[in-house]
Amino acid sequence: MAMIKLVPLPCSCPTYLHIGYRILPSTIRNQASSSTQKSRRLISLSLSALVFSTSNSWANPQVPKFLELPNSGGVKALDLRIGDGVTPLDGDVVAIHYYGRLAAKQGWRFDSTYDHKDETGEPIPFSFVLGSGKVISGIETAVRSMKVGGLRRVIIPPSQGYQNTSQEPLPPNYFDRQRLFTTIFNPTRLANGEGSTLGTVIFDIELVSLRHL
């Protein structure tokens, strides 16, 4: 996969978020739905225009900023697309597509729903009950204020992410749990005070659908 050059984005995120992401997979199956294709193109294009910076002196003031979500414990969000559907409530079954990356390790993408496909090759959204505590709290906070069809990038601090090795990654059958937790809970780097750097995760989340129970 080719690398892309990122343009500075003004926000108050720490300096360790200066990272280079890889372009998302460019091979999309012919039978993929048009909505899936549009979402993936939007995520790919947005990566070329976003980076996290502490300096505002030379940044483009027209570039939108990440905003901290109310009562979120420090979760910051940037809406890449505003949905036109309904907003979920606690108890609803929500289905999302996501790309999950670490702020550390050059933005290593540790999981994506587009890597989990059904027998026809279609990517499978991840479903959970909002408010059930089955996913990290930063994900629930982000989804709770979205509308169906929306696409949002969120920066989740360790306090709202993976706080211990007893937690299940998202989704629970994630294929590389050991590598994720070995990075986040590296004892040597934690002892050096790098906990916030290692534990900060970044998700691009699309709210695909919801169902009232």
Image (cartoon, rainbow, N blue to C red):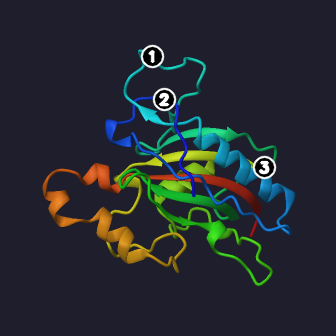
State the SS at label 1.
loop
Against 177, residue 205 (above or below) is: above
Q: Mark 2 points at which residue?
A: 8
Q: Percent position (x, y) of residue 83?
A: 76, 44
Within the image, what quadrant is residue 95 found in? bottom right
- Quadrant position of residue 113: bottom right
Give the side of residue 50 with respect to residue 206, left or right.
Answer: left
- Do labels 1 and 2 touch, CB within 8 Å? yes
Amino acid type of disc 2?
A: Pro
Question: Which secondary structure lies at badge 2?
Answer: loop
Residue carrying label 1: 58
* Residue 35 horizontal/vertical position (percent): 82, 55
User: Is residue 135 something that shows in the picture?
Assistant: yes
Three-letter code for the amino acid on which mark 1 is drawn: Trp
Q: Is residue 34 above or below residue 72?
A: below
Judge from the rendering whether residue 132 lies leftward or rightward of residue 162; answer left or right: right
Q: Quadrant of residue 209?
A: bottom right
- How far separated are the C-alphas under marks 1 and 2? 9 Å
Mark 3 or mark 2, earlier in chain: 2
Q: Disc 3 residue type?
A: Val
The Cα–Cα distance between marks 1 and 3, rounded to whole angstroms, is 38 Å
Nearer-N-terminus badge (1/3): 1
Name the residue that disc number 3 marks. Answer: 86
Residue 104: percent from the left, percent from the top? 35, 53
